[in-house]
Amino acid sequence: MSGKVIDFNELKKGDFHWRGYVKIGIFFIIFIILMLIIFTNVYIVKEGEYKVVRQFGEVVRIDKTPGLKAKVPFIQSVVTLPKYQMSSDVSEAEINTRDKKRMLIDNYAVWRIEDPKKLITNARTLENAETRMEEFIYSAVRSELGQLNYDEIINEKSSRGSLNDRITDKVNELLVKDNYGISLTDVRIKRTDLPTENEESVYKRMISERESKAQEYLSKGDAKKNRTIANTDRKVKEMLSSAEADAEVIRAEGEGESAKIYNKSFSKDPEFYKLYRTLESYKKTVGNQTVIILPSDSPYASLLMGNTK
């Protein structure tokens, strides 16, 4: 019977190489695991952020200074929170003014985290804290604007005054009371609108008020125009009366002077004066169709008959 001869030395050598490869593989795997553990549990704190380290849900450490930090593997977790100021657009809300008008208010808020531990402990997340802050803002805005009339709210120069400061103070008091670890820097009203169903009636009322105001201006203008015309007419009449009176005086003086000159001239030749007066009377009494019946020996008719004696 024939067969192959087995070399046990070769088998041992091969087994040695196989075991060596296994050891290298295990070492490599352990190295990779260690690196993963290290890299997943080492973190960097950047400028402008907080790193909140939690263990079983409780805050055990807050890293505020920039640098490389580490946490306990599998037990601790890290939450990142911003250190800088943030701005939020507060959801549009409807309020009622003191004069019972409905308005839509659109605000924005500027805020920041003051105590990360309080935020995580009481609000759990940044989103929850922001939501609670918006609720407080809406409550404060509704309370403050509910004490003002509609015209005072839309007019920046009215008693609206330090409305934004009062709202900011009220919201901060509520945030401190509930220990949310955040503070409101400022809140501003971006826009004030009327509900859609009220806009048309308000526009009509505004148009009616403007038309009424325009009619009032027109009436005042007409009244002023009439007063001006009446005053002008009165002054013109007074000027004409004064001018006519002056003219009458001047005319009377002229006629008197003329009469003196006539008398002085005609007194030098009475016959010529008589002839002149007679000829002047002809101008007024004799025309193309004038019929005058006079005796033939009438002195008045003697000139007409060509008798100049």
Image (cartoon, helix red, strand yellow):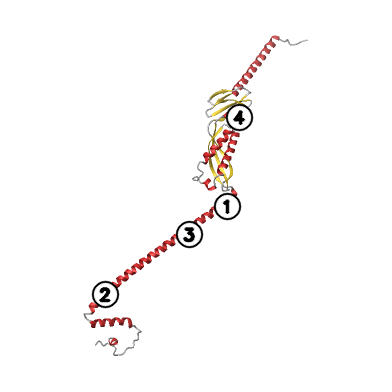
Give the labeled residue for mark 1: 201
Residue 101, given in percent of the width and then of the height, sits at 57, 48
Say what secondary structure mark 2 lies in: helix
Left/right placement of residue 235 relative to residue 59 reads left
Tell me which residue sits at (33%, 69%) in the image.
245
Say what secondary structure mark 1 lies in: helix
> Which corner quadrant of the image does residue 304 belong to?
bottom left
Q: Residues within 10 Å of mark 4 (few under 14, many from 20)?
A: some
Distance of label 3 from label 2 (alpha carbons): 57 Å
Say if 61 sits above or below 127 in the image.
above
Q: Which of marks 3 and 1 is in front?
A: 3
Distance of label 1 from label 2 (alpha carbons): 83 Å
Residue 258 marker: 2
Distance of label 4 from label 3 (alpha carbons): 70 Å
Along the polypeptide, which appears first: circle 3 or circle 1?
1
Residue 219 marker: 3
Along the polypeptide, which appears first: circle 4 or circle 1?
4
Along the polypeptide, which appears first: circle 3 or circle 2?
3
Distance of label 3 from label 1 (alpha carbons): 27 Å
Residue 121 marker: 4
Distance of label 4 from label 2 (alpha carbons): 122 Å
Residue 299, given in percent of the width and then of the height, sits at 28, 87
The reply to whether callout 4 and callout 3 are in contact (CB within 8 Å) is no
Depth order, front residue of 114/22:
114
